Image (tube, rainbow, N blue to C red):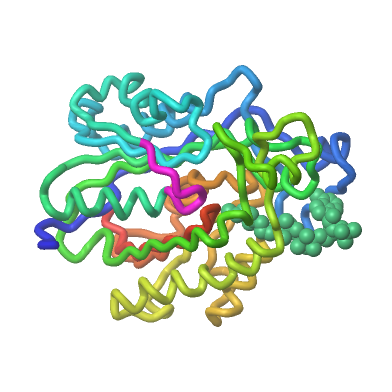
């Protein structure tokens, strides 16, 4: 591909549900304890949508904030991509709902499902459109209503996940800034490690779902843990090599937030201090495709990096999938 323009992030936004579900609330719902959850995952609380609240409202809110931050009007958008594994509707797509709510009348719109790796997948896809000059402004949103597919009686999963949305406007930036490298990968042979059936459930799917709802998310936590630690390291090294950089050149790693032990393990394998790995897991849990943009915005607002700093974003998720990106911050 002929790269004509550099592509970078022009604005960020996030939106979390108001309702907070603490570990102490969960103690009343399943056989668990705040002590176990904090020690084994690093999570203290998470945000969840009310039953009558759709996830797309978070996507619209986060998208609007990212547009404001970028100083771009909705009419200027060429494309909206929503990364989600929990769309409110099979159709219309979450991206079309966002397009309508924002009045982004000139934007094409589609959803992309790479689970927790979705935001970096979407960043990779959108960077092609910006770099080759086809589009000028794209809105990317990671948005999840995971609480809707959680079995609230399954302590193996219900303590881990939350709801939320994070958004970024991408467009042209000065040469040498923005997205320097991306890497996306998948191993579908490990797909059974995390499943949530939609229109079809196999006998195997039905067997592992004990309750009445046969559509809930089921996970083999320890298999995912092993995979996660491996691909966090691999994904980080991949984009460093593509960029001819080392970890010394990186100001901050913003990883997908799933379990503090995964982050600590990855830091250890990479031989870096835990301080170089951003975490806000304790207050949101795992919000899947939203975790990277929500983390990025929080780290930016807290001045953890500034213009010219190199960042690595790295993620893993259901599929199983993984993804990483190296960005020279341009704002
Ligand atoms: C799920 C996860 C937290 C489990 O932690 P773990 O330390 O590996 O725990 P184990 O699975 O070995 O289970 C240990 C025991 O704790 C129990 N346990 C599991 N969840 C529990 C909970 N919420 N409260 C109390 N006990 C719990 C298990 O039942 C098991 O009991 P047993 O020994 O009597 O069978 C961890 O494997 C994990 O985070 N995996 C990655 C998941 C992930 O990131 N998924 C999303 C991908 S995007």
Residue 138 drawn at (x, y percent): 25, 40
- Residue 218 seen: yes
Q: Residue 184: which quarter of the image?
A: bottom left
Relative to residue 79, is residue 90 drawn left or right? right
Residue 152 drawn at (x, y percent): 76, 35
- Residue 40 seen: no
Residue 80 drawn at (x, y percent): 30, 35
**Residue at coordinates 69% horizontally, 43% vertically from top-left?**
203
**Residue at coordinates 47% horizontally, 65% vertically from top-left?**
253
Relative to residue 174, is residue 117 drawn left or right? right
Quarter of the rendering occupied by the N terminus: bottom left
**Residue at coordinates 83% horizontally, 48% vertically from top-left?**
34
Viewer-closest of 16 and 32: 32
Range of magenta residues: 111-118
**Residue at coordinates 42% horizontally, 52% vertically from top-left?**
300
Viewer-closest of 168 and 80: 80
């Amino acid at each position: 591909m002929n790269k004509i323009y550099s592509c970078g992030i022009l604005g960020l936004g996030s939106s979390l549900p108001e309702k907070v579900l603490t570990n102490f609330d969960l103690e009343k719902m399943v056989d668990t304890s705040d002590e176990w959850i904090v020690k084994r995952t690093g999570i203290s609380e998470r945000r969840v949508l009310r039953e009558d609240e759709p996830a797309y409202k978070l996507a619209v809110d986060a998208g609007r904030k990212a547009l404001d931050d970028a100083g771009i009007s909705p009419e200027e958008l060429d494309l909206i991509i929503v990364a989600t594994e929990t769309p409110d509707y099979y159709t219309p797509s979450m991206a079309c709902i966002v397009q309508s709510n924002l009045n982004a009348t000139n934007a094409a719109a589609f959803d992309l499902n790479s689970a927790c790796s979705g935001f970096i997948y979407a960043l990779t896809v959108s960077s092609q459109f910006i770099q080759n000059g086809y589009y000028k402004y794209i809105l990317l949103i990671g948005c999840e209503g995971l609480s809707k597919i959680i079995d609230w009686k399954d302590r193996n999963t219900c303590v881990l996940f939350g709801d939320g949305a994070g958004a970024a406007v991408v467009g042209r930036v000065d040469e040498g800034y923005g997205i320097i490298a991306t890497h996306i990968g998948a191993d579908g042979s490990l797909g059974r490690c995390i499943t949530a059936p939609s229109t079809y459930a196999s006998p195997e799917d039905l067997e592992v779902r004990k309750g009445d709802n046969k559509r809930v998310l089921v996970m083999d936590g320890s298999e995912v843990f092993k995979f996660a630690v491996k691909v966090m390291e691999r994904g980080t090294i991949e984009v460093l090599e593509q960029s001819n950089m080392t970890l010394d050149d990186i100001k901050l790693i913003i990883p997908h937030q799933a379990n503090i032990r995964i982050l600590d393990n990855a830091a250890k394998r990479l031989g870096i201090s835990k301080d170089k790995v951003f975490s806000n897991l304790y207050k949101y849990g795992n919000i899947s495709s939203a975790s990277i943009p929500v983390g990025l915005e929080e780290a930016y607002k807290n001045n953890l990096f500034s213009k010219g700093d190199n960042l690595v974003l790295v993620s893993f998720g259901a599929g199983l999938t993984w993804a990483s990106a190296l960005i020279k911050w341009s704002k």
